[in-house]
Image (cartoon, rainbow, N blue to C red):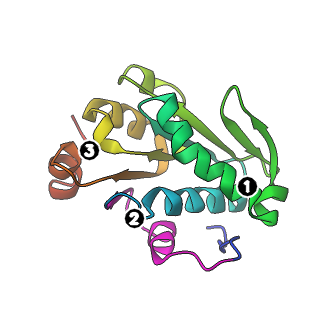
Amino acid sequence: MVQIHSPFVKEPDPLYYANLFATERIVVNQGGTSSGKSYCIMQVLVTIAMAAPNYVITVVSNTVPKLKEDTMRIMAELVSNNQLVKRSVKDFNKSDRVYTFKNGSIIEFKSFESSEQAKGGKRHILYLNEATRVDYMLFFEANMRTYVRTYLDYNPSFRFWVHERIIENKTEYP
């Protein structure tokens, strides 16, 4: 395994470390609005992208506007506010929404509105932002094409497939 150290000057939140060093295949982050879930997970993804050469990391939400108002905004902030991160990023393709790192890793931002769209490319890491906005089959198809780890986050406003299929049963099959 690659040695991983935080590239962030300010000491990250404990949630950052819990996600970075998680051993579960599927890591569930449940918390209220402004609890720091998305921010910490994006920090973890940047850390992994910098440490693990040629990784494909896919950040998914149900719409492009949702990506732009949340995870992409966080990513832009992480790159612009940290010189080490900024120097590690080789390119940002705005139209494809892909950050390419100098070590060959990428962080791509995709919107999937259906499980058919999730049947595309394979990846090492999947981050499903606001999991309550997507159905189980979309998660299933995207997760099935993920080699290393899947991160999920959501606000706990109601029970949905994560509770029955992931937390309680620990099953990811349809």
Image depth: mark 2 or mark 3 in front: 2
Left or right relative to 74: residue 40: left
x and y, in percent, of residue 91 in the image: 81, 41
Which residue is identified by label 3? 172
Number of numbered discs overlaid on the protein picture: 3
Which residue is identified by label 2? 35
What amino acid is found at the position of numbered circle 3 in the picture? Glu
Q: Secondary structure at mark 2?
A: loop
What amino acid is found at the position of numbered circle 1 in the picture? Val
Left or right relative to 165: residue 147: right
Q: Which residues are magenta?
A: 10-31
In this view, which residue lies farthest toward the top?
Answer: 116
Which residue is identified by label 1? 79
x and y, in percent, of residue 170 in the image: 21, 54
Is the residue under label 3 in contact with that under label 2 (CB below 8 Å)? no
Mark 1 closeness class: few <14, some 14–19, many ≥20 residues within 10 Å:
some
How far, Cα to Cα, is label 2 from label 3?
26 Å
Q: Quadrant of the C terminus?
A: top left
x and y, in percent, of residue 112 in the image: 44, 27
Q: Quadrant of the N terminus?
A: bottom right
Q: Which quarter of the picture shows residue 123? A: top right
